[in-house]
Image: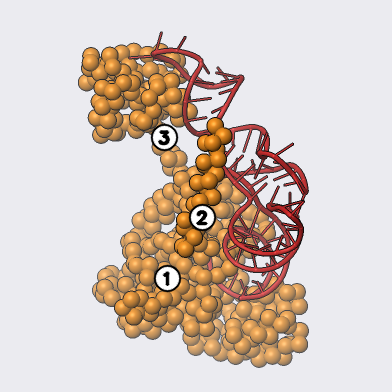
Amino acid sequence: MDSKKNAKKIIKRAKPEKSKEEPLVLQTLRGMKDILPSDQPYWEQVRRISERLSRDYGFLRLDTPIVEFSNLFTRSIGEGTDIVEKEMYTFITRGGDKVALRPELTAGNCRSFIQNGMNVLSKPVKIFSTGPVYRYDRPQEGRYREHFQVNFDAFGEQDPILDAQMIQIAHRIIQTLGIKSVQMQVNSIGCQVCRKDYKELLVNYLESKKSKLCQDCKRRMDTNPLRVLDCKEDKCSQVAALAPQSVDHLCEECRTHFKTLLEYLDELDLPYIINPHLVRGLDYYTKTVFEIWSSAEEGKKLSLGGGGRYDKLIKMMGGEDTPAIGFAFGVERVIAEMKRVQAKPYKIPRPKVFLAQLGNLAKKKSLRLFSELEKNGILTAESFGRGSLKSQLRIANKLGVEFTLILGQKESLDGTVIVKNMTTGAQETVSMDKLVDLIKKKLKADNVVVYHN
RNA sequence: GCGGUCAUCGUCUAGUGGCUAAGACAUCGGUUUGUGGUACCGAGAAUUUGGGUUCGAUUCCCAGUGACCGCCCCA
């Protein structure tokens, strides 16, 4: 006994020495995580609801590669943005191409739209996409280096009714996922022309109040003056409160667009507010921008998702002038919120039948029987590797199945199988060829095959 | 990128500058031969990594790594 233990310890000690030259680190990379089976009901729910609603609203699915030429992102998102400046996973391929892991989905979708000539499709072209995106930033709760987004883009329609519909579907998905208490925040940051004018106006104003701003904001005045409006410092928000607002300085077209959008939103009974300080981190936005926030409890400073118009992006990228609008939400954040408000995850179907086998002959036959049950839509669990009936029943019990099928030596020879009711303990022997029908009947009678969602 | 807090079995927790680092849950096995839930018994399983101080460190110090918090920013 002692020698056994010692031997183990020696092996343990020896292990690291063996692999000294290249230590194997059994750990996910910083800011990345596994999505474990126990979490899958939530993910499944998000997938199902998103896919269903995307279809309901006429979106077609598009999947694009995770890796693209890196300038696809730098040019669309904007050279000066944080995402591009310090958060991109960029590398050179063996072929010498400068590529990057996508930090968001819209750029790739636009590329695909142009490359595949989707402008010939009837407008609007509504695109649904989902998958991982990558940003090399400092991880925290709700912020990951790899996270999943569910994304909607619509190309070729400049009518603000599409803005309203986009906000509607965003709201609808989050609500359907069980997050009832949400708030939509909307704003208009104008088009290229009026935004530029507004920025000048704002900078002039801020310049006059410079002494009252925090250090960060003094810096922001140059890099991103709109951000000053968002600062949490008391003194800055006092300055921001009196600052000129973008909505008051829109050009005629942008003002009408925004006004019409608000009329549509009023019609929809959505819980929205106009947040004149709402600014988004990507350069390509024009006119409408919006975010979706949970309002269940204060404290959370993370939006669940956001989006906006990018009317000039396709043209800027070299495509035909095509107005567009998009929205994305972060799956991890939405799931965290679902858990917080105790929203119901998807109920993954559990087996109602367990197949136990006993003896060599039965073991051989059980594989075929299992397959037979599966083909007939009877979800069955098993533990073929286990020998004793006792341990198999224990598993069956733990799984909470309705029936256990027992196939032993005797039954194998007779062409029968024992059906044991796990609630009552009663069991009957039935012939193999009647088994499937019998089980189907029993499950139906017990009304156990009802799943929600 | 900057500042801070933390780090013990799979999970949740105890504990200590010095004998085999404790418990619960979970896992696996057993309580005779072909029958589950309870009970009883047993097994495996951890001091994040690397240095340093020390006769001796899981404990003290430094660094790395990671998680989390506050910035920056964002989904």
Name the residue tied to disc 3.
Answer: A350
**Image location of residue A387, percent across then percent down:** 38, 24
Which chain can be seen in red?
B
Disc 1 secondary structure class: loop
Both marks 3 and 1 on one chain = yes
Question: Residue at 35% across / 30% down in the picture?
Answer: A384
> Label 3 amino acid?
Arg
Q: Please, what secondary structure does the residue beneath circle 2 have?
A: helix
For chain A, give the colour: orange
- Circle 2 sits on which residue? A16
Q: Is the residue A242 above or below the residue A13 in the image?
A: below
The answer to whether residue A6 is seen in the rendering is yes
Which chain contains the residue that carries disc 1?
A: A
* Direction from residue A30 to residue B6 in the image, left or right: right
Find out whether the residues at labels 2 and 1 contact each other: C-beta distance under 8 Å. Answer: no
10 Å neighbourhood of mark 2: few (<14), some, or many (≥20)?
few
Residue at coordinates 54% horizontally, 66% vertically from top-left? A291
- Between A185 and A430, the residue placed more toward the observer is A430
How far apart marks 2 and 1 lie (CA) works out to 36 Å
